Image (cartoon, helix red, strand yellow):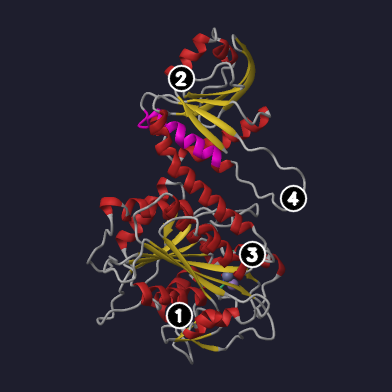
């Protein structure tokens, strides 16, 4: 999408004019002035249409004859200006995109921006957010369709301060591009996005940006680190070996400042392994790598917009396949942290990959906070559907910070119980330290989190060494419709921006994790 900001509308050239209208058919000053210049041609289109009141998401379109020729007009209802916030524009942008498509025009589109009474947003913010909402809505995954593709949109927003608008828009654009990249990764089928291909894509994409280092750990490296959990899942894929990708952004491993750590589950296809999933549940399991897509998407966003935060990330990439080489139920594995795990079900593979990735990150980088994202359990979908991401944590304040960042970008988390002794007990093994499946009924998302909690490194007093949050995106990454949502990219980007950039760097410094 091509975006520009202008101080004045080009009345000659514009073919489509977008006029935002607030509740009660309220127009902004610039729109009213333009209407006068056009001899009330714009308002004429609305007269006699009492059902269009400017309510959120309402749209009225039409062609009007102006002193500068025929124009397609889109009146976009924006509702109550007082209620407008950044997240309102995802919906408004998508509504506007649909209306734009109906005009058939792809260029010479002018978007009138105004200051609306009661709104806390400047007209520059309004324009930037709305364009970002349209940009987000333009996403499609049609690379495997051989038919001709549609043209990219060119939009011009009319604002007082074009520099300011650009300044607000540029990082939003960067993040939305990163969200689109994460969606692309999620939508790629598993025969195209094998773990090795995925690692190459990450390396190629991220190396374009400054201050980021990417390295791939292959099977031999993982063996050297004793990652018995991740390797067990990988061993059923003789054709497509697994790997891990480590990304350091602004991180100097010798620095005393502890970085933020991100971890992502990247199972490029989860068949269940020898505990094979039934057909209906297997469909969609190409997206079992969406946790990793969120993490690499967020790293791209941080690097591309030049964040000054120190962040290190790791994604565990593998298939989970049935094969003569596959790991089996009852196998006992030795994990990177030295603990042993017995396998109750080969379909509980994500936690094995994550556990070793988490150990690697902690042992190499000693993060102050670690956040992992994973499409980990069907149980979280039962509990929260596709609406909320289940958030599990060992620290009240971390949860609050995560929830807050999500609310701003319209990605919602629901705090789930994690540390109850019953859940930890349910994950103990009979013959090994732990089991990868729970021995109790229900709470499958919490027992999965309790399993992961065993892999948070402890200090000499047995206390968790870092703050940790586990985000189970099994529902939110894969909404009905079969397209990846890109959940997590915007959320993590915002979380970093609010808590680890500029003056607000490292919010926790020397305090210990705390759960009331
Ligand atoms: N990848 C699945 C979880 C999942 C389910 C993601 C539905 C997206 C939609 C995970 O690896 C899995 O299979 N979990 C099992 C665990 C069980 C065997 C303990 C599950 O949730 O059924
Ligand atoms: Mn599974
Ligand atoms: Zn899985």
- Please tell me which residue is depicted at 49% across the width and 78% down the height of the picture: 440
Q: Quadrant of residue 505?
A: bottom left
Report the predominant secondary structure element of the magenta stretch: helix
- Please tell me which residue is depicted at 69% across the width and 51% down the height of the picture: 143
Dot 2 or dot 1, earlier in sequence: 2
Seen from this angle, which residue lies furthest left?
Answer: 510
Which residue, given by chain and number where applicable, does mark 3 sit on?
Answer: 193
Q: Secondary structure at mark 2?
A: strand
Task: Give the alpha-carbon distance from disc 2 to disc 3, as whole Å.
Answer: 50 Å
- The x and y percentages for residue 74 are 58, 24
Task: Give the alpha-carbon distance from disc 4 to disc 3, as whole Å.
Answer: 17 Å
Image disc number at residue 26: 2
Dot 2 or dot 4, earlier in sequence: 2
Q: Nearer the viewer, mark 3 or mark 1?
A: 3
Q: Where ligand 1 lies, by quadrant?
A: bottom right
The residue at label 3 has a CB less than 8 Å from ligand 3: no
Q: Nearer the viewer, mark 2 or mark 1?
A: 2
Task: Give the alpha-carbon distance from disc 2 to disc 4, as whole Å.
Answer: 43 Å
Q: Is residue 451 above or below residue 165?
A: below
Which residue, given by chain and number where applicable, does mark 4 sit on?
Answer: 145
Dot 4 or dot 3, earlier in sequence: 4
**Of residues 249 and 25, the one drawn nearer to the viewer in this rendering:** 249
Task: Give the alpha-carbon distance from disc 2 to disc 1, as whole Å.
Answer: 59 Å
Name the side, left or right, on which 460 lies relative to 169.
left
User: Residue 131: within the magenta?
Assistant: yes
Magenta region: which residues?
Answer: 119-135
Dot 4 or dot 1, earlier in sequence: 4
Q: Nearer the viewer, mark 2 or mark 4?
A: 4
- Please tell me which residue is depicted at 43% across the width and 73% down the height of the picture: 358
């Amino acid at each position: 999408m091509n975006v520009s900001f202008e101080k004045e509308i080009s009345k000659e050239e514009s073919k489509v004019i977008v006029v935002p209208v607030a509740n009660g058919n309220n127009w902004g000053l610039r729109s009213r002035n333009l209407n006068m210049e056009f001899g009330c041609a714009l308002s004429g289109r609305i007269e006699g249409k009492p059902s269009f009141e400017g309510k959120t998401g309402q749209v009225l379109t039409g062609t009007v004859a102006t002193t500068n020729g025929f124009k397609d007009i889109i009146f976009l209802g924006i509702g109550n200006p007082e209620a407008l916030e950044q997240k309102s524009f995802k919906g408004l942008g998508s509504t506007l995109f649909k209306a734009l498509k109906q005009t058939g025009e792809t260029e010479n589109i002018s978007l009138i921006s105004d200051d609306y009474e009661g709104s806390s947003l400047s007209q520059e913010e309004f324009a930037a957010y709305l364009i970002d909402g349209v940009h987000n809505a333009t996403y499609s995954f049609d690379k495997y369709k051989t038919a001709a593709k549609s043209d990219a949109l060119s939009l011009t927003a009319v604002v007082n301060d074009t520099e300011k608008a650009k300044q607000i828009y540029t990082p939003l654009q960067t993040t939305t591009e990163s969200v689109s990249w994460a969606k692309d990764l999620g939508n790629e089928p598993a025969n195209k996005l094998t773990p090795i291909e995925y690692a190459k894509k990450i390396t190629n994409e991220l190396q374009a940006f400054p201050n980021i280092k990417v390295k791939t750990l292959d099977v031999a490296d993982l063996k050297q680190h004793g990652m018995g959990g991740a390797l067990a899942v990988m061993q059923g894929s003789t054709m497509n070996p697994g790997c891990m990708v480590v990304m350091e952004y602004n991180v100097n491993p010798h620095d005393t400042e502890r970085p933020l750590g991100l971890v992502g589950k990247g199972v490029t296809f989860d068949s269940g392994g020898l505990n094979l999933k039934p057909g209906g549940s297997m469909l969609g399991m190409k997206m079992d790598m969406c946790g990793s897509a969120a993490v690499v998407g967020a790293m791209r966003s941080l690097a591309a917009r030049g964040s000054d935060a120190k962040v290190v990330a790791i994604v565990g990439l593998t298939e989970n396949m049935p094969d003569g080489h596959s790991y089996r139920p009852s196998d006992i594995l030795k994990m990177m942290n030295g603990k042993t795990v017995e396998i109750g079900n080969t379909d509980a593979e994500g936690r094995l990959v994550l556990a070793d990735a988490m150990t690697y990150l902690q042992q190499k980088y000693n993060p102050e906070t670690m956040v992992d994202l994973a499409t980990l359990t069907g149980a979280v979908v039962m509990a929260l559907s596709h609406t909320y991401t289940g958030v599990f944590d060992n620290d009240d304040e971390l949860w609050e910070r995560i929830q807050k960042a999500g609310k701003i970008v319209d990605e919602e988390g629901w705090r789930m119980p994690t540390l109850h002794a019953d859940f930890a007990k349910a994950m103990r093994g009979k013959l090994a330290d732990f089991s990868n499946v729970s021995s109790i009924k229900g709470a499958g998302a919490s027992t999965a989190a309790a399993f992961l909690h065993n892999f948070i490194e402890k200090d000499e007093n047995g206390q968790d060494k870092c703050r940790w949050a586990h985000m189970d995106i099994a529902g939110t990454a894969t909404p009905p419709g079969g397209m990846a949502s890109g959940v997590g990219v915007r959320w993590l980007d915002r979380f970093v921006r609010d808590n680890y950039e500029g003056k607000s760097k490292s919010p926790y410094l020397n305090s210990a994790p705390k759960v009331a």
